[in-house]
Image (cartoon, grey):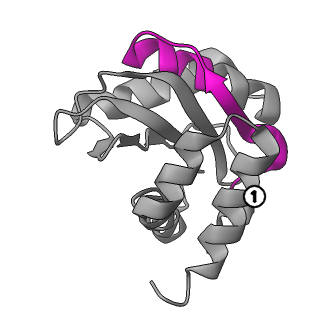
Amino acid sequence: MDLSDLLKPDAIVPNLKAVSKKQVIQDLCAKASRLTGISERELFDTILQRERLGSTGVGQGVAIPHGKPRSIKEITGVFARLSKPVDFESLDDQPVDLVFLLLAPEGAGADHLKALARIARVLRDAQIAAKLRATTDADALYALLVDRGSSSQSAA
C-alpha cells in the first residue's frame, strides 16, 4: 500500500500552529471534514475515543492518530508538520511535530492495519523525517511522503 492511496496533495498542512494535542487533533479533523464532507464533530469524537485507549504518539516526534468514523467510505489521511512540537503523551515522552491522521471505514480491518504500518515505516525513517521537518512547502512535503514512501516499499 502506497501513501498516495491514502493521501492527496490537498491533505497536507505544512505549518500547523497548535499548542496542544487536542488542538492538533481538532485542526486535523477540521481539514479532514473539508476533504471528506463528514462532520468535524464525528471525526473529532472518533479520534478522541481512540486516543483515550492510549496515545497514538509512536515516538521520535511522530503521532498517528486514527479511527473508524461510521460515515467514511474510503481510507483517508491528512498529514501535518507542526510549527512547534506539542506534548502528545508519546511512548518515548518526546513532543510530536509530525502527525498523520488516518481515517478508515469500519470494515477496513486489514487495510487499516496495513495503512498504519506503512505510515509508521515512512515517518520513522530518520532521513525522511529530517527532510519533512526541514520544509514548510506543502508540495515538497507531499512529494517526500509519496515518492519516498513508495520507493522504500520494496526494502521494507
Report whether 132 appears left or right of 14: left
Estimate the x, y position of residue 38 in percent, counting from the top left: 73, 28
Report whether 77 appears left or right of 133: right
Measured along the vertical axis of the image, is residue 12 above or below residue 28? Answer: below
Q: Amino acid at mark 1?
A: Ala
Question: Which quarter shows the C terminus?
Answer: bottom left
Estimate the x, y position of residue 22 in percent, counting from the top left: 42, 14
Estimate the x, y position of residue 108 in percent, counting from the top left: 55, 61
Measured along the vertical axis of the image, is residue 19 above or below residue 97? Answer: above
Estimate the x, y position of residue 112 in percent, counting from the top left: 50, 61
Q: Can residue 73 be seen at all in this image of the molecule? A: no
Residue 63 placement: quadrant: top left
Q: Is residue 24 magenta?
A: yes
Report whether 116 appears left or right of 33: left
Magenta-drawn segment: 6-28
Q: Considering depth in this image, is 118 or 48 the residue closer to the camera? A: 118
For disc 1, the marked residue is 143
Measured along the vertical axis of the image, is residue 116 above or below residue 14? Answer: below
Q: Considering depth in this image, is 98 or 135 the residue closer to the camera? A: 135
Residue at horizontal 69%, vertical 31%? 13
